[in-house]
Image (spheres, rainbow, N blue to C red):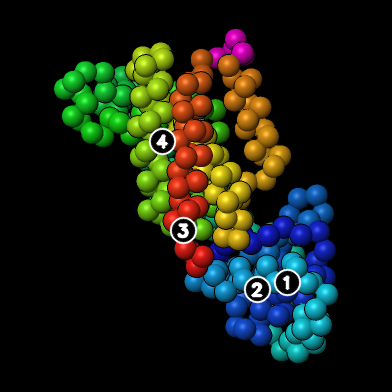
Amino acid sequence: MMRLITIDNPRLGQAFIDYMALKHIEIVMVPDVEATFCLWLVKDEHLHETDIELKQFLAHPEDPKYSAASWQTDGKQKPLFRYRSPSVLQLFYAKAGYMTLGVCLLCIVVFVLQMFGLQQTMFNLLHFPTSQTGAWQIWRWVTPAFLHFSILHIIFNLLWWWYLGGDLEKRLGAWRLANLLVLSSAGSGIVQYWSDGPGFGGLSGVVYALVGFIWMFGWKRPELGLSIQKPLLGFMLIWLVIAFVQPFMPIANSAHVAGLLIGMGLGLYEAKRAPVNV
């Protein structure tokens, strides 16, 4: 399943559902937060055609073809408006692809091993390269992203990774997400190492790379359906500033800034080369 859009008028949503049903494309609507409703595409292979139709619908929702579709489908199909929200697990799997979920699983496994007495062992195995010899152990340029040092650290990082990385993977594919993961892990790690040494870990540099990527990509290619909401973008940028001045916890600020800039650069690059029919 693929999340398409959030709306506040269920009648309009049902009209679009009925219209797409005539094209044999199944969409369901479920209640969301604050009296809004979310449209979900059931089969991802119809995403391109659905995106085109959705843009036309949002531009001209009053077009008679949508109300006519409701009359044509009335009584001829099972109801597609599901008032019962999908389970947390259904939503979790629907939003994320294999790459997104695989990284989540890897981080969880590493964290569990750390909690069961192997913290130093895992750090020694996965930390950023600190010598010329270590630099040839190429996994070390990426693996610090899989280290987390508290339950809150891993929860928040994985939630952002799932939310933003899942969108990127669903829209642009696992390869682009993997590319961003590798480049932003290595790039933000280099900057953080120069700034404060090798004692760092976590996906936060990659998360900020996702923020920067989706921000720039959505700005340049809004028609491809990958964007970040302005309140969320504002929150992430404000937190970036607050993290520099708060005295309560050690935060890899250099990695955050580097990740954001790397993501913005990759987003602009991919926006130029991405075909219209991604």
Mark 3–mark 2 Cα distance, whole angstroms, equals 20 Å
Residues rendered magenta in the picture: 245-249
Secondary element at image label 2: helix
Image depth: mark 1 or mark 3 in front = 3
Q: Residue furthest left?
A: 133
Q: Badge 4: how crowded within 10 Å, few (<14), some, or many (20+)?
A: many
**Could you tell which of marks 4 and 3 lies nearer the N-terminus?**
4
The amino acid marked with disc number 3 is Ala
The disc at residue 110 is none
Q: Is residue 36 above or below residue 202?
A: below
**Could you tell which of marks 2 and 4 lies nearer the N-terminus?**
2
Residue occupying image coordinates x 54% and y 49%? 217
Mark 2–mark 4 Cα distance, whole angstroms, equals 35 Å
Residue occupying image coordinates x 82% and y 63%? 9
Mark 1–mark 3 Cα distance, whole angstroms, equals 24 Å
Residue 86 seen: yes
Q: Which residue is mark 2?
A: 53
Image spot of residue 276 (x, y percent): 51, 65
Residue 143 seen: no
Secondary element at image label 3: loop
**Could you tell which of marks 1 and 3 lies nearer the N-terminus?**
1
Q: Which residue is mark 1?
A: 57
Secondary element at image label 1: helix
The disc at residue 184 is 4
Magenta-drawn stretch contains 151:
no
How would you classify the magenta stretch by its main secondary structure?
loop
Residue occupying image coordinates x 46% and y 25%? 255
Q: Residue furthest top?
A: 247
Secondary element at image label 4: helix
